[in-house]
Amino acid sequence: MMEKWVTIKSQGEKEAREKAVKKFKSSLGTGVEPEELIIREEKTKLIDRIKGLKVFRVGIPGETQGDIELNLDGYFRFAFASDGVFLKVFPSKGKGKSVKIQEIKEEAEKLQLQDVDWEKVEEDLQRIIQENTENRLFIAERKPELDRDAEVEINVAKDGLKAQLDYSPPIGGEYLSGEKLEEKLEAAGIVFGIIEEKFEEIIKSKVPLKGVVIAQGSPSVPGEDGYLEFHFKNKNDGSRGKVREDGSVDFFNLDLIHNVKKGEPLVTVKPPTPGKPGKKVTGEEIRPSEPKEAKIPAGKNIEPDDEGKTLLAGIDGQAVQDRNGKVSVLPVHHVHGDVDLSTGNINFLGTVIVDGNVTEGFRVEAKGDIEVNGNVSAATLKSGGSVKISKGYLGKNKNSIECEGNLEVKFIENGKVKAGGDIAVEEAILHSDITASGKVVVKGKGLIAGGQVQAGQEVEANVLGSSLATKTEISVGVAPEIRENLEEKLKKLDELTDKLNKVEKAIRLLEKQKEKGFIGEERLAQLKKLVETWEQLKDQVEKLQEEIGEIQETINFSEDGEIKVHKALFPGVSIRIAGAQHKVKDRRSRTRLVCSRKEIAYTTF
């Protein structure tokens, strides 16, 4: 019986036996005990000795073959000897497939065998299959001139990262050995990434092999280019509206303006990361490409930090990145159109200029000035500077305009306006709530009718009130914030007085119960606490009354402020100058109203 053999590389005999058991189980479908195996140590190559490995030939004894070789296909081999070419046939086992004559003919053609008696070969093959015995048949005379040694051709890829091998098995010539294969690789200059596990596959192959990867290089790992780390949202993501927590969409607050303050970091330049070199199968180093440095995108109003790696805002304003990638800080935010769903609400640290209108429901806030070249319709404007509206403000009795500086507008209708400076109106103020720390001046048509107007210094108009006796209130001579402070304190005084009266009532009730002896310890404690509360409230009321008295005294003794009416002052208009009040009874023109000796006085001009 024949024996089965495998070549194993391992550090010792025990490991070689264990590896062989796994290999036999995989290829033959059965198990063998390690101690049953035949083992012998072979000559070990230098490269294996360097790795601490030994080479062993491990085989299965012939007497166990009967159990192992069940269900194996038959096969054949040609053997070239000095006395001829022989065919050795191995019959199938169990349910395996038998060797076919056509298979033998095809292989003989590849080997270029001549003068074969195929009728005799087929007859001998059938006999071998029937007898189920191995046999060696002479089929042709050997012709040395047709012998060919095993051939190997090695090709290295253009990038040097892979070597591929084409192998042709010998025809009557010399077989390829591991040593010869190593010599071939060395001759081809291949010294790195050799895949030694492929050696046995190539050497034992009875058929030609093409494109076997025999060595694999190590590619270089490219570095990473330097990049810019932005500290502000420099791109609009194209979304329209912000999703709220409840899932609804807010189309007003789009956060399209990127406000920054002086000294705030905008962009940090990150350095490139170097790559790792690779290696060709020929041993040459493959250098990675040099990563690129990121360019510093400094634009207008930008300052570098001390290390020159981070760009800082040089002023308060809007951080932007232009189409060339440069980052700047702009002191002015320019809306080239309307403030509407396309822009959302505007909130900016500098000045805002709107070429169109501010549409209903939207909000424009600026630390600097606000300039609107169209109308403002039921919107909110809030400015840390001045506000200029080229057309009108249609308030619709909702939202408001507030500025710390002056306000210029063509007309105001049903609006609420508060200015820290002067208010200048070209045509009219109708049914509005107007407050200015300085002056309120209405030129042109010059009409003020309906609502109330408060000015710290002066109100000037062509027409004040109307022939329909529209309720109109004009107040000057006292800074609006002083009157607001007085109103707040009066309101708080009413609240405290109400609380004080309720505490007094509770105290009187408990004192009556105490006099009659119908009060326990808990009620006595409650009475004590109420008395303490009453004393605290009384102190607060007295202090508040004192503050109110001081404010009222300041107002009453002031004679500042005046009202000028050029064309018509209509009856029914309520006038308040400092602490004096008056209701106009007769129509007048070219009238100047002032406070004299705590009374309203009329003069002409």
Image: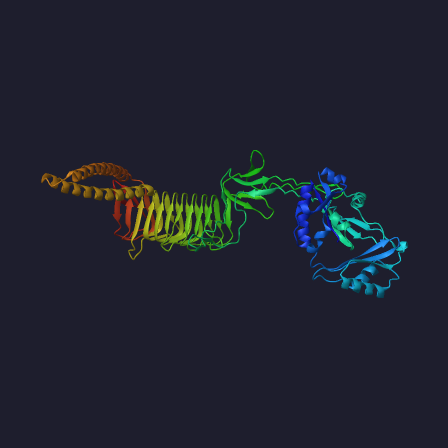
Q: Position of residue 467 (x, y in %)?
A: 30, 57
Judging depth in this view, the residue of 69 and 20 nearest the camera is 69
In the displayed structure, 504 sits above or below 3; it is: above
Figure colour scheme: rainbow
Judging depth in this view, the residue of 567 and 306 nearest the camera is 306
Q: Residue at x 53, y 52 (%)?
A: 237
Q: Position of residue 154 (x, y in %)?
A: 79, 49
Quadrant holding the N terminus:
bottom right
In the displayed structure, 472 sits above or below 279; it is: below
Is residue 330 toward the left or the right of residue 119 in the image? Answer: left
Determine if residue 173 is in view: yes
Judging depth in this view, the residue of 523 and 11 nearest the camera is 11
Label tally: 0
Is residue 192 toward the left or the right of residue 490 in the image? Answer: right
Q: Position of residue 178 (x, y in %)?
A: 78, 45
Considering every residue shown, the one lying at the far front of the view is 63
Q: Residue at x 84, y 49 (%)?
A: 174
Considering every residue shown, the one lying at the far left of the view is 516
Q: Position of residue 42 (x, y in %)?
A: 76, 42
Considering every residue shown, the one lying at the far top of the view is 306
Q: Residue 8 falls in which quadrant of the image?
A: top right
Determine if residue 445 is in view: no
Is residue 246 toward the left or the right of residue 335 in the image? Answer: left
